[in-house]
Amino acid sequence: MLSLPPIASTDPILSWVWGFIATVHNGTLEDKEDAANSLASLAADNDRNGKIIIEEGGVVPLLRLLKEGGSVAAQVAAATALGNLSTDQERVSQIVAEGAIPVVLGILHEAPMKVQAKVAHALSRMVSHDPNAKEAFGQQNVIRPLVSILGSDMDEPPAAGKNNLTIHSVVQLGIHRRPGNAAVDHPRGTAAALRREREEEDLAVKSEWKTEVARALWKLAEESESNSKRITDTKGLLCLAKLIQKDDGELQHNCLLAVMEITAAAERNSDLRRSAFKTNSPAAKAVVDQLLRVVEEEGKPDLQIPALRAIGCLARTFPARESRIIRPLVKQLGHMNPLVGGEAATALQKFADPGNFLHTEHSKGIIESGGVASLVRMLKLEEKEAQVAALILLCYLAIHVGNSEALEQAKALSALELVSRTSISQSQSVKELLHQAIKHLELYQAGGGGHPHREMYEYP
């Protein structure tokens, strides 16, 4: 008669894990589903359980169940378990080493919506924890099927000719005509059945499907210039812009965060910036239009902040005196939420930064849009980050356009002198910038009788 080893009697979790893994290997389909759900639950309970599942060989049968399926519920259970196991870099590395990448790719090319949604969620967790996995998935073209999913179901006329391409058709051309795109063969009946299923699927399932795919793109792009470029190469920017325009909730938020990461990569990488965000690029224009629309929406700081951050990252791509871009950002300096105002100031800093070739012209645009008075008011905020952001931007304006009447009328010199005696000016970089700004204003505003207006500027 067989019995469990002594260690299993002292550690019941171990015996449960062995049993569940054995069932996922050899049980009936229904039993495999139940066992995968049990492993998913154990992995979600605590890190130790996940460690045991991986060490005892649970990844391979879960990947096989996900790949071969037999039922949607069984595949969803396997994908959920793999996602719950992806809690740190070491574990993700083990999961990838066991063959996760080709299985995930296969599912994202052709599988029911519910399965693809769970796999996309698991993918998000994997690439969030392991930068090596993030790059490996990107190199294996995981971005193309993700973009294809996001581009599906977009309004497309019955006959789209060469001069009548929708965003969806452009995306598909970008995906399928690029070299190196390994096709995945599927029986026609399977593909047709999946299309019918998608057309008939519940709207909540469709929403979750795209939401998780957008999250996966966001996490793949996060701090990755190579993956950001891959997204722009597949026309992913057009898809993201369209979804930001027509959707709301978590899907819209994930798309905004994906765009924010792509623009951050473009800010760091001049080649990506020039290729993806050319001023005459339809994708770049679509993205900027939607970012500006979101910035001007009231009462949505969780959306306005990433939109402001993304526009700031693109500051070097805009031509001189671009009032269409500058004015909405200046308007947000007076936002009732200091986090939004601070983010607007940080974004505008990048227009006025000396490293921006057009910093003087942009600085004039900020002043002409009424930015000085708002910045002076922001120096009185209790939110320190917003204060510092406003202070740095005001210093840039004083240095670049010190002879502006708006600076004198807003009593900017008095404001800066008062700030120089507070704690927010104590960091070395801010102190030097502030000193330079005060010197510039003193030079331009010097005259008989000193500065009588200084006494009128006081903190409450």
Image: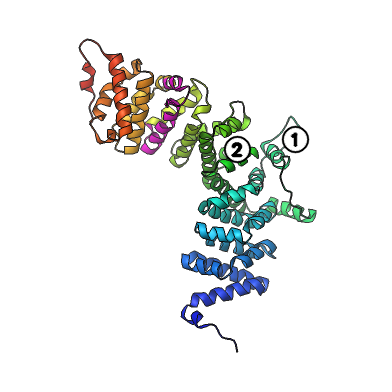
Tell me where the magenta segment starts and ends, as one range: 334-363
Q: Secondary structure at mark 1?
A: loop
Q: Residues within 10 Å of mark 1 (few under 14, many from 20)?
A: few
User: Which comes sooner in the sequence, label 2 or label 1?
Assistant: 1
Taking the image as shown, residue 355 lies to the left or right of residue 432, namely right
Residue at the extreme bottom of the image, as rendered: 1
Front in this rendered view, residue 116 or 248: 116
Disc 2 marks a residue whose amino acid type is Leu
Coloring applied to the structure:
rainbow
The answer to whether residue 103 of the structure is visible from this angle is yes
Q: Position of residue 267 (x, y in %)?
A: 51, 34
Q: Report the predominant secondary structure element of the magenta stretch.
A: helix
**Is residue 426 on the magenta stretch?**
no
Taking the image as shown, residue 312 lies to the left or right of residue 247, namely left
In the picture, the disc for residue 40 is: none
Residue at the extreme right of the image, as rendered: 188
Query: For mark 2, what is the residue?
Result: 237
Q: Secondary structure at mark 2?
A: helix
Q: Position of residue 117 (x, y in %)?
A: 61, 54
Q: Is residue 444 above or below residue 424?
A: above
Query: For mark 1, what is the residue?
Result: 160
Disc 1 marks a residue whose amino acid type is Ala
The residue drawn where x is 58% and y is 73% is 20
Q: Residues within 10 Å of mark 2 (few under 14, many from 20)?
A: many
The answer to whether residue 46 of the structure is visible from this angle is no
The residue drawn where x is 73% and y is 31% is 164
Q: Quadrant of the N terminus?
A: bottom right
Callout 2 touching callout 1 (CB < 8 Å): no
Determine the CA span between mark 2 and mark 1.
20 Å
